[in-house]
Structure formats: C-alpha cells, structure tokens
Image: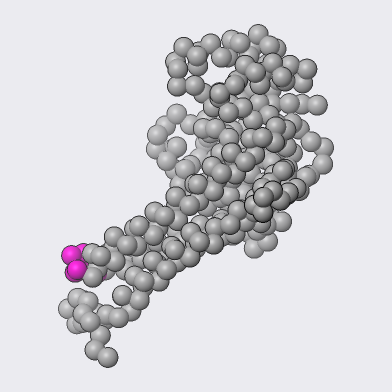
Amino acid sequence: MVVYVVYRASRNVKDRSLMPRRLYGLGCSKIHKGFWEIKEMKTSKVIQLLQGKQPVLLKKTRDLRRPNLVHAFSVKKPRELGSLLIVIHVSDRETKREKISNFLKKAPYIRLRRSVYAFFQDHPLFDKENRLVDGHKFLAFLEENGEDFKVISRIAIVNQNCIERLVEETKQRVEEELLDIAESCKRYQIKFSNEICDPQCVITTLTRLKRRFETIKNIASFYEKWMKIDFSKSLMKSYRMVKRIQESIDNRRLNADGELELTVS
C-alpha cells in the first residue's frame, strides 16, 4: 500500500531544516515541501516524529470511496471524506499565488497545507450542474498559467482523528467569507444611508457582493452534502444583509442628474 504524509512546517527555522533529514533517515521520499511518501512499516515512527505538526496520513486506494458519516452527540461528523484528488502546486511569485487564491474561492476543497489541496474526486455527485471549480478545472487553470504541479488521485485519509480538524478549518474558512460579505454590506449600507458614498459605487459593489454570495452559497451547499456542515445561520445572516442594502437602493431612484433621491410613495 502506498502511504503519504502531509504536515505543516514548524515556525522554528532550525526544526524546519532538520525535519527533512530525519524523514530521509526513515526512508521517506520527498514529493513536495511537507508532503512525503513513506514506507508503511515506518508509519508509526513518522507520526511520532511529526507530533505537533498536524500530520495527515494518506493512502492510495483502488476504488472510488464515498463519504461515510456517523452521528455523535447529535452532531454529524464525517468518519471518512471519500476519495480525494490531491493537487500540489509550486508558485514563488506573489502575484501568481494571489491569482490562484482567487480562483480557489470558486472551489470546494480541503487545504492540507500551503500549496497542497484535496478535492472530492467524485465532484459531480454533489455538483450536478457543474457550477463550481473541481480538481480538474483547477489543474487546467494551473496548466494555462504555466504553473508546475503534481497530482495524486484516489487518495483516502488514514488517521481519522485529523478529519474533524480539517472539517472545522473548512467550516471556518466558509464562515469567514460569509461574515466578510455581511460586514461589507453593513459598511456600504451605512455609507449609502448617510449619503457619504457615490451611489453608483454602492450599486456596483452590491452587484459584486451578490456574485460572491451566490458562489459561496453554492460552495456551502456542496460542503453540506459532502461533510454535513450546517451553514444555514451564517448564510441567512449574509442573505439578510445583501437584501437590506438592495431594498435601500430600491427605495430610491436616479434623477435626471444621475443622483439618487428618495422615491415618493
């Protein structure tokens, strides 16, 4: 069985430089920074070595696996996330990294570490309308932009104790995006009400925020099916803020000078 481990680098510079030597000493083969192929018989020693660095054990599988969910204390928690497509990319340019980050905002994925992402392999199962970015679209994007990358398909997480952490990190990332949308709406709502902002700027911003909300709503729906994460409260809060600023705009009209004024009812 082919086994891999991915871990997050220590903040300690000395420890960061020593770790590769220790892994080589255990017969491991480097795939990428923090991503190694290991010998199955050395698994326990590798995990012990990487204590405190959030190691995730991965194994290659023959068949496609579906998520297997269990219920604990009335909270749905995934026991297995199904078969994953691992994408590893290398980009030293800040502008390219930002472009990649923006592209991934349209994708449901798990961040295993910097530049290492896991996509649900059977993506159409939860996105039949093909509205989101999956692993294959991400690969095509990297190729179009001349980025170096590696792909490993049909991967399953071995150490289930880390699944809850990965799911929680994913949930936090989505909720932060929803909170940012809500806060942005609130700021522009105040500016619009106090007439301290160009009205056309508010309308343009609202259009952009609506697109962001629609995208993250679709991503949240994917995660709800895949990981059984409930985003209903966060989605409703953001939706209400988007609707509120839309209603404020609808209650005004553009006059001949292009300025917004209150509609007389």
Magenta region, main secondary structure: loop
Instruction: List x then y, in percent, for residue 174.
Output: 50, 51
- Report the residue at 59% width, 40% height from top: 166
Magenta stretch, residue numbers: 194-199
Q: Residue at x 43, y 62 (%)?
A: 238
Quarter of the rendering containing residue 47? top right
Q: Is residue 32 above or below residue 128?
A: above
Q: In this view, does 112 lie to the left or right of 81?
A: left
Residue 201 occupies quadrant: bottom left
**Above or below for 55 versus 67:** above
Hey, which residue is sitting farthest bottom in the picture? 265
Horizontal and vertical percent position of residue 60: 76, 32
Q: Position of residue 235 (x, y in %)?
A: 49, 62
User: Would residue 60 appear left or right of 90 to someone viewing this image?
Assistant: right
Q: Is residue 240 visible?
A: yes
Q: Is residue 155 left or right of residue 255?
A: right
Q: Which color scheme does this rendered protein use?
A: one colour
Which residue is at a point 44% across and 50% down the rendered structure image?
176
Task: Determine if the magenta segment contains residue 16.
Answer: no
Position of the C terminus by quadrant: bottom left
x and y, in percent, of residue 6 in the image = 62, 27
Q: Is residue 195 magenta?
A: yes
Please tell me in which quadrant of the rendered image residue 202 appears: bottom left
Identified at 64% across, 30% down, the residue is 56
Which one is nearer the viewer's eye here, 22 or 63?
Answer: 22
Q: Is residue 151 visible?
A: no
